[in-house]
Image (cartoon, rainbow, N blue to C red):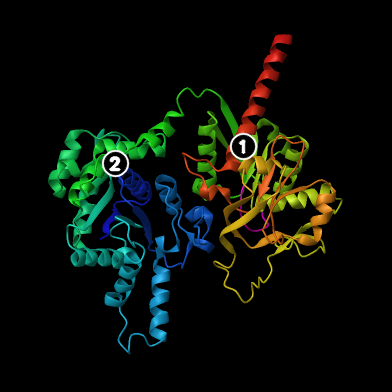
Amino acid sequence: MTKYIFVTGGVVSGLGKGITSASLGNLLKARGLSVINQKLDPYINVDPDTMNPFQHGEVFVTEDGATTDLDLGHYERFTGVNLKKDSNVTTGSIYRKVIESERKGDYLGATVQVIPHITDEIKRRIKGISNDVDIQITEIGGTVGDIEILPFLEAARQIRKELGQENVMFVHVTLVPYIGPSTEMKTKPTQHSVSVLRSAGISPDVIVLRSDRILNDEIKSKVSSFCDVSYEDVISAPDLEDIYEVPLKMFDEGLDRSVDKRLNLETNDPDLDRWKNMLKLKEGVSDTVEIAILGKYFGLPDSYLSVVESLNHASLHNKAKLNLHWVDSDNFNVEDLKNYDGVVIPGGFGYRGIEGKISAIQYLREEKVPFLGICLGLQCAVIEYARNVCGISDANSSEFSKNTSNYVIDLLPNQNLEKDDVGASMRLGTYPCKIKEGTLTSKIYKEEVIYERHRHRYEVNNKFKDELEKHGLEISGMSPDNNLIEMIEIKDHPYFVASQFHPEFKSRPWDPAPMFKYFIEAASKRNNSTKKTIENLKVKD
């Protein structure tokens, strides 16, 4: 029988419930248990597909093509478990399902209400993904006291009542702020958030205390006493330099031991050797690699979260320290790109910043600066090549311009935006890609066919394929039916590789995405070469 852990949050959002849930999944999996993670989001959007990246962060794509909250990326990167669409549930999707059922007459004329109809649907979604796993960790988004999460809390309370105290537990993540003038850590916000949680009929079994520093025993004892939780079940979670250190900190604090005891799991201590060995790669790293992300979503760093994490993974395994730079595609000096060891142009939508990306790609191509293009990055690279190498001066995408007949990038076949919903109407999820022999891409992947995740609506127009290849653009990856261009590269360049898919979604800290790993390797070589040039100039002076 599956046992359930619900993770709630108090005081403020953004405390790290996702990292806590992911770290707990990591530890329990290391104890030999099968684990699956889930996120309940209180917003009324059906999914995050159309939400502003400045506000919400990146949209994470699962194997089966669901567009989900970015926390699912954390879950996958910490546990290694590939999740599916049922691991992300929104208020919007719940209400849509209930309303559809009501319209069909499934409720036999009953008055449809939050309780029991909404809560029953929530419970169905929670229980529907567990299958035969040992542990399901379900994070409830938002903070206790938010009116929109009350149905989720009620559903979780009912599940505990139905399945029994021994099969369901609650982990509450809450803030302990430091007040500068008084030089004190304050537990009152935690006490209040626990009180609010209890008003919903839920008493936490474990409390995770988030803070900007290590908490002393006095603080933990105070929370234990005032919130009626055993001292051993009060977990200190201070800010750490690296999020991948969190599972080890949680282990030291005994989070997994508390869960093991509370749910009567009777497992052995976790085997954390792989995780510890991965973190040891940071030891003795001296070389720095200067990498720029050139895009338009910089109001919230999480807008490109999986790209950033993939760069971190790749840098770690190349024994290089990542120094990341953000370049606004709307406002930069193209000559400044020479200061970077490599440039990434990630995915995105809309025409803003496009010409800046195209001019940047031309410079990176001509000056032989390592370049990694993802999704939109590939499309911009094709436009640039068509204009400046193939001589098609008005080459463009039908997404960005209606004033040309040379759409080298165009809508996917069978796309009709007037009829389809904008949300989730793209090519989504995992698709195969056939790699061309003898290319750099074949060295990167070392496989004839790879499987990567997609999220796009536009593709390279096959009408221009022969012209692009004639002028030297290497089409290094195609769909198995040869209808869709998946990857391109340029010969006689340190690293000029772009993909229509998103390799960042499958990168893991112990197993970096191959495209990122080789990109950082090329960037490191450029860094070392630049250092040698500077040293030689100094010697001559």
Disc 2 to disc 1, C-alpha distance: 42 Å
Quadrant (top left/top right/bottom left/bottom right) for the C terminus: top right
Amino acid type, mark 1: Tyr
Amino acid type, mark 2: Pro
441 up-or-down from 316: above or below: below
Residue that carries the numbered disc 2 in the rendered image: 177
Q: Earlier in the sequence, mark 2 or mark 1?
A: 2
Q: Which residues are magenta?
A: 346-352
Pointer 2 with pointer 1, Cβ within 8 A: no
Mark nearer the viewer, 2 or 1: 1
Quick one: 208 or 509, which is closer to the camera? 509
Residue that carries the numbered disc 1 in the rendered image: 518
The image position of residue 9, as x and y in percent, is 30, 53
Quadrant (top left/top right/bottom left/bottom right) for the N terminus: bottom left
280 up-or-down from 221: above or below: above
Find numbered disc 1 in the image and state the secondary structure of the residue it sits on.
helix
